[in-house]
Amino acid sequence: MRQQIIVAGCGFAGMWACISAARTAALAGREDDIEVTMVAPASNLTIRPRLYEAGLDDGVSPDISALLRAVGVRFLAGRVESLDAAGRTVTVVTADGERQVRSYDRLVLATGSRVFLPDVPGLADHAFNVDTLEEALVLEAHLAALGDQPESTARNTVVVGGGGFTGIEVAAEMPGRLRAALGQDAAIRVVIVDPAPEIGIEMGGDTLPYIREALDVGGIEQRPGQCVTAVDADGVTLSGGERIPARTVVWAAGLRAQELAAQVPGEHDALGRVIGDAWLRAPEADGIFVTGDIVRAATDEAGNCSLMTCQHAVILGRVAGHNAAADLLGRPLHPYSQPRYGTCLDLGEWGALYTEGWDRQVRLTTAEGKAMKKNINTVWIYPPAADREAAFAVAHPDYVVGS
């Protein structure tokens, strides 16, 4: 009877975990002994880092079913509803509503994260976000329809809650999106709000002058040191008492691990992530590997830890998938590390800001940074071709994207 590896999730970590596990079994000549199954609602990899963009199309959610078949991975359309770590089973609700209990020998949990909505009055009812493709498309349709509304300050205003990476990218893109909807001469207004003392401070001190310049070029107003305290259909109220009329509020203030992570025994961090060991095992749940946005793991010996980003998820997925298969085969496990860390922040018409290292050393700005951003968003993070050898060639745990 074949041993079962179940991979829950079809994001960056889930996809690469599947390919890496299949590769490890193939290299050991044990493909007939191990069956890798991906469980996800659909066999599409949503290119989540692009959801702040305008003009979303099929290219941001490529179908990877042919890729999975090419590497010998089964796909089950459904959602892992619950897990029993002691019994080594998962309960899957399939696409047609059937509830199945499936046994596993190794489970790779890669179900990702969700946008965090704090208990702010009106936020859940009136704010948009770009957390999923479906929600990003709702925002896109809303913006396109603004031109049908009567002229008003609220119609022409967008407030972005959250001055981190996603919030800045959403805000920087918004002037162009508003002009496309309302006309080039419209009196538009974009405001970004964050409780931090300066917008973009999490990017590091060397980046702040560039971020300030880019936001100024885009005409984007900043409200650092402020929180959104209420949202309604016509605007927001800030902690300082300011009322901003706005028909469009976009929430981009942080992520939390998907709820399934809470069912994994052991320690979790403040974001709901399982604290994984060096091999991405859940220390208190034998047979479970945690990866992507579900895990908090050390990336190096300097105290840095994995982040909820696709560049971390890609390597985390490769390592977790490899280790799940290697564990079954009695092979050495591969420790997780993040040998290369870079960020590329899209800053709208100004361009983009590319940094390297955990200290965020600025390498490229403006047009050069924008070219790098395009390469990352449209080439580097996309799935490999549906070719077994080509996929396996880039699925080993030490492979670095862009190398």
Image (spheres, rainbow, N blue to C red):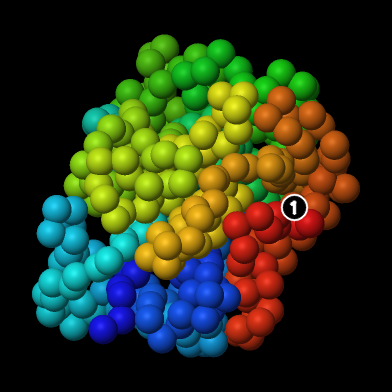
Q: Is residue 185 visible?
A: no
In the picture, the quarter occupied by the C terminus is bottom right
Is residue 343 positioned above or below 86 on the image?
above
| Residue 353 x, y percent position in the rendering | 77, 39
Circle 1 sits on which residue?
Answer: 373
The residue lying toward the viewer, choosing from 218 and 170, is 170
Circle 1 crowding by C-alpha within 10 Å: few under 14, some 14–19, many from 20: many
At horizontal 88% and vertical 48% (from top left) the residue drawn is 368
User: Given the image, on which type of amino acid does mark 1 rest?
Assistant: Lys
At horizontal 50% and vertical 27% (from top left) the residue drawn is 193
In the picture, residue 365 is in which quadrant?
A: top right
In the picture, residue 197 is in which quadrant?
A: top right
Q: Farthest residue to the front: give it.
A: 330
> SS class of the residue under badge 1?
helix
The residue lying toward the viewer, choosing from 382 and 312, is 312
The residue lying toward the viewer, choosing from 314 and 107, is 107
Is residue 375 positioned above or below 236 on the image?
below
